[in-house]
Amino acid sequence: MHSAADGARHRLEVFVLPGIGEVRAGDDLAATILAVAGPAASRLADGDILAVTSKIVSKAEGRQVAATDREQAIADETVRVVATRAHPGGVTRIVENRQGLVMAAAGVDASNVEHGTVLLLPVDPDASARGLCAALRAATGLHLGVLITDTVGRPWRDGQTDIAIGAAGVAVLDDLRGSMDAHGRRLDVTVAAVADEIAGAADLIKGKTSGNPVAVLRGLGHLVGAIDAGDRGARRLVRDGASDMFRVGSAEAYAEGYTAGLAAAAGAGASVGVGVSVTPTDPGGDGELASDHEVPDAAADDRSGELPVEAPSERSSGPHVAARGTASA
């Protein structure tokens, strides 16, 4: 790890390893990368970090399925629906997947794959990164780090960027708490997500259409360390439920509140012998009754990562409960 002052002494170099062709199921990914890194990996040096696009990892691991099975694949990879939004092109579904990542369509992707197929994320990106990093280190004798990256959209921001979904031999967070800023003020909350920053920098040169799935970053050797099978790797970057202030979308939060209000009202009514009916009002807060078409349909999806441009309307703070004073005998 390094202090806040250390950043000024680093020079960052980023370049691709061109020549990696189509990766097939069962391919030795380390051998594929080393083949384009030159004799004795001459293009690599101690402290280099390799940012590897998740697609070639998934392909090597045989994570392709028929496109006709896409919806089932999304359902199978989904642990929790975070938010859905209907738009002219269909329905965007933001979900938490098996890897703990929150993204569109659970990460199931149809870009840069053979026609008629879609690609799932690696089963365990951190384990994939550890295996690849160990193989590269053993073959080269170099102290290397590996990040597996994927492209995601972001809340509150247009466009997509790359993040680290797997890591080995690389510090994914740089904890600057306790250090001093340039004005002598103590930093109490700053923890830099360096793995995501590296992934974003690598994507600037890898691109989406150039066929260069591996980038090398040089100048960040202070972040390269031991490969620890017990390390959580990039999983450390995922917020847990207790600290996630935006765990569900607004429509889903409204639905959860309505369900909780219904249960609470029913319980209160039963205890005093009063019949209780709960009527949801429009989440837009205009006092009109909600209708079925306002509940997003989660049956369709895309992997664009883009949410519709329309801003969501204000949601009411909770369910609207109307208690009818119908006394029971």
Image (cartoon, rainbow, N blue to C red):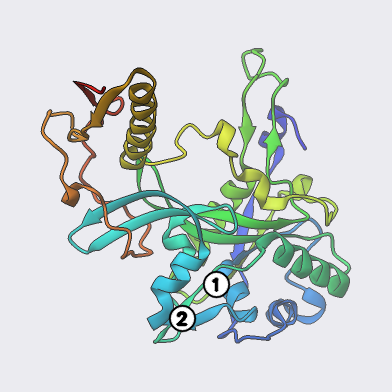
Q: Which image quarter holds the C terminus?
A: top left
The image shows residue 182 at horizontal and vertical percentages of 63, 19
Q: Would you identify the image quadrant in which residue 160 lies?
A: bottom left
- SS assignment at label 1: helix
Residue displayed at 42% across by 79% down:
69
> Disc 2 marks which amino acid?
Val
- Near mark 1 (Cα within 10 A), the count class, few <14, some 14-19 or many ≥20, is many
Question: For the residue carrying disc 2, how many other residues have a C-alpha within 10 Å: few (<14), some (14-19), or many (20+)?
Answer: some
Q: Can residue 108 be seen in this view?
A: no
Taking the image as drawn, is residue 125 in sight?
Answer: yes
Give x and y (percent) for residue 259.
36, 37
Which one is in front, 222 or 241? 241
**Can you identify the residue that label 1 sits on?**
55
Q: Is residue 29 left or right of residue 86?
A: right
Q: Which amino acid does label 1 sit on?
A: Lys
**Residue under pointer 2:** 113
Outermost top residue: 184
Which residue lies at the image location 28% right of the left edge and 51% below the top edge?
Answer: 85
- Do callouts 1 and 2 mark residues in contact (Cβ within 8 Å)? yes
Q: How many marks?
A: 2
Q: Quadrant of the N terminus?
A: top right
**Residue 45, disc:** none
Q: Which of 282 and 222 is in front in this view?
A: 282
Q: Where is residue 25 in the image (x, y as percent from the top left)?
A: 62, 86
- 121 above or below 168? below
Residue at 72% from the left image edge and 33% from the top image edge: 6
